[in-house]
Amino acid sequence: MGFLAGLIWGVLIAAATVALEHYGPSSEPLHISLSGNGATAVPVMFVPLAIFWGWSWIANAYSGRSVVPMAAYTLALFVGVSLIGPADAYFFPQGTAAFGVNDFVGGLLQGTLFVGFVAIVAAPIYWVLRSRVGATRILIWLLYLVSLAIAAFVAGLGTIVAGGLVAGVASAHAWQRQGGRTLIAIIVIVIMAIAVFGIPYVQANGLSAPRF
């Protein structure tokens, strides 16, 4: 069941990414484009959400026997997201380039970046916070803020690292609260939206309001 859920999440993320890459909207006042390379905002934003949702659900369902189901879920998410490259090459071929192994290799690299890297960051944070009796609400919220700082000040993979931190903290947050997953999911979405769209906008334009 966990594997199937992870695969569904991954396929949906891959489908949305490919669709937006070719048909995504743009906003000049907001300096946002979801087409082309801008479509990578989808996995950057929603993989942390998928990891949080799956891990917290599995932790509640399997209690102390959740390691293997979590691994299966994450592997399936990886497989689903890795379809970005092959799906894009198959449905939107570039010139005379033939659909082949290279497209799957590219997809695996995307899966490694968007899922594998995030999961590697999230897992130790989740297990440490979950096992630590003294993990307070203040620490949880402080780590959420740290994720935004990482997105703002770490060049390159900062936003992806921030996503891993958010996923791990949110999963532990849900375990600590023993519920409230919907509220925590909203927190994850808001933080990742700020990291993906808000911080780059402020860095490029300062605090000036967009003009429509």
Image (cartoon, grey):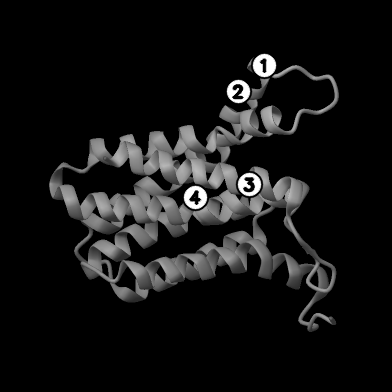
Q: Note whether 11 is above or below 98 in the view shown.
A: below
What is the distance, in whole Å, between disc 4 and disc 3 at their CAs? 12 Å
Q: Nearer the viewer, mark 4 or mark 3?
A: 3
Tell me the residue at 69%/50% (across/down).
20
Q: Nearer the viewer, mark 4 or mark 1?
A: 1
What is the distance, in whole Å, between disc 2 and disc 4 at their CAs? 19 Å
What is the distance, in whole Å, between disc 2 and disc 3 at their CAs? 16 Å
Mark positioned earlier in the residue sequence (2 or 3): 3
The residue carrying mark 1 is: 100
Mark positioned earlier in the residue sequence (4 or 3): 3
What is the distance, in whole Å, between disc 4 and disc 1 at their CAs? 26 Å
- Residues under numbered marks 2 and 1 in contact, where contact means CB atoms less than 8 Å apart: yes
* Label disc, if present, on residue 104 of the rendered structure: 2
Of 206 and 184, the residue lying toward us: 184
| Image position of 177 (left or right of 82) | left
Quarter of the picture containing the C terminus is bottom right
Tell me the residue at 61%/22% (across/down).
105
* Label disc, if present, on residue 17 of the rendered structure: 3
| Image position of 170 (left or right of 106) | left
What is the distance, in whole Å, between disc 1 and disc 3 at their CAs? 20 Å
The residue carrying mark 4 is: 47
Residue 94 x %, y %:
81, 28
Which secondary structure, mark 3? helix
Which secondary structure, mark 1? loop
